[in-house]
Amino acid sequence: MGITSEYIDESTQFFLEATEKPMAVIELNGDICEVNENFTRFFKVSRGSNINQIIAQQSSLEFTATLEKLSFEKSIVCHFFMKVNDKNECTVKTNLYFNHKTNVIILLFALPIKFRENQEKNWLGALKHTSSLLFLSTKDGYIQDMNDLSYDFFNLSKERFIGNNIDYVLSLFSEDSFNEDAFKKQALESEYAETVQQYIHPTKNIRYYKIMMIQDHVSDLFLLKITDYTEKILLQEQLGQTDSMLEVGQMAASVAHEIRNPITTLKGFTQLLKITADEDTTKYLNVIEDEIERMENILSEMLTLSKPTKIEKKPLSLKGLLDNIIQVISPKSIMENIKIVRMDEFDGVPFLLGDEGRLKQVFLNLFKNSLESMQPGGTLTIYMQHCGEGQVNVIIKDTGKGIEAHNLTQVFMPYFTTRSDGTGLGMPFVLQTVEDHGGTISVSSEVGIGTSFIVTFPIIEKDETAFKKLINSK
């Protein structure tokens, strides 16, 4: 049976885009329908292959039995011996979810730490092949090694750093607001910490640097990576002082025009190559097609901001819209053990005049951000409440890691993102769409407690009976 898009419904597609863990969607016979980027990266197989290629022999029978068992159960968590990176066999925690609507199985993999760590943690290669400043330190903070770029940058000898404490490096970037002890504690407890700090060169030239500290349990070392962040900071400030959406629009239109033509050419040649390609080559071509599609999606997101599509407003039920989107995100919440609480403080069913497609994307963006901010056991609360005459609030509250105070003012700024793979265009789209519907959006957050978004919309009627009367009278 050929692989077609009919296997990937809206909720599965959302899950593929939202999770950073390796994920695959398979048929009942094991054929792979769809994968995300990290699945291909770690398991070296893609669409068109069979999942049994990466199941080690000692887990083959158990895996088959688990697939059969899934027909009667919604979700199962198991541990299987699997082939990672073509050669390593190890135990991988696997969440399996059976989508009864499309008869496919979603597999979500939690790899051991030694595989999950960023590839930059191949220490020797990282020290030699990077444009960032890199320091290796022990768990106690004493510097073991560094790349040549680091001591050249500070114009200090390597001996000045080796054996010294990592505090010495951090103090060179220290601002009044930078709590070095809290930064190191976060890296120790969470395996990762990052901050953006100012550095004043001897020439009095001020630049900004992103400082990341990553813990590696395998080598029991820390990697401190310092990357020049000045251009991005300056761009954010420039966009904040001018009409930021206009700036993004001009930039997006220019970028899209320059990139779309070569993308079209690449797609055409890829399809031609597949005609005569053997099985192995076809797998690689599938990966290329996936990456091309990813680039097109980013361009489309940018163009939405540069040339917003005409809004087609129709009466719609806000409750029905929210319930529909919750169904889309429920597989991800179930497999990641995140509880969704739905409650309303509103008499009746409020109706809006809006563009259903664009509003749906607004709430998908907000729900996705909340899910990604939480660990297993978290809670996402979604509810409506009255907000004065003729208005309704939609409150989205999570129990995630929260947003630092200095970042709250930048949440809706174009290109601002705290994710390494984020475009920083999702929240500007949310803001623009909400305002296009006559609404407002605000955010509050507390680090370690969670984040709340409040979206306020004008309503045309507060219940279905009144709405039907309104329609019939026209």
Image (spheres, grey):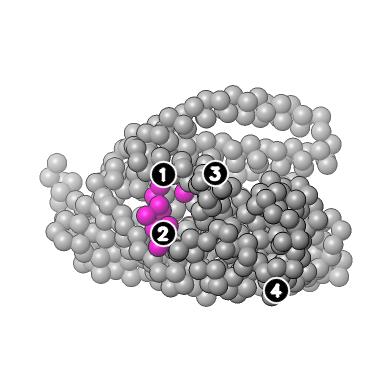
Instruction: Indicate the secondary structure of the residue bearing disc 3.
Output: loop
Residue 64 seen in this snapshot: no
Pick the residue in front: 265 or 27: 265
Left or right, 203 with respect to 90, comes to: left
| Residue 308 horizontal side relative to residue 296, left or right | left
**Pointer 4 residue:** 139
Q: Residue 185 lies in what quarter of the image? A: bottom right
Please give the range of residues in magenta. Answer: 405-416
The numbered mark, 4 or 3, whose residue comes first in the sequence reads: 4
Q: Quadrant of residue 394?
A: bottom left
Q: Kindly identify the residue that appears in the image at 67 percent across and 50 percent down.
A: 155
Disc 1 residue type?
Glu
Tell me if I can see residue 57 in this picture: yes
Q: Position of residue 171 (x, y in %)?
A: 57, 63
* First-in-chain label (3 vs 2): 3
N-terminal of the pair, mark 2 or mark 1, is 1
Q: How far apart are labels 3 and 2 at the CA level?
A: 27 Å
| Label 1 neighbour load within 10 Å: few <14, some 14-19, many 20+ | some
The label on residue 237 is 1
- The CA distance from mark 1 to mark 4 is 37 Å
Nearer to us: label 3 or label 1: 3
State how far apart marks 3 and 1 are (Cα).
22 Å
Q: Earlier in the sequence, mark 1 or mark 4?
A: 4
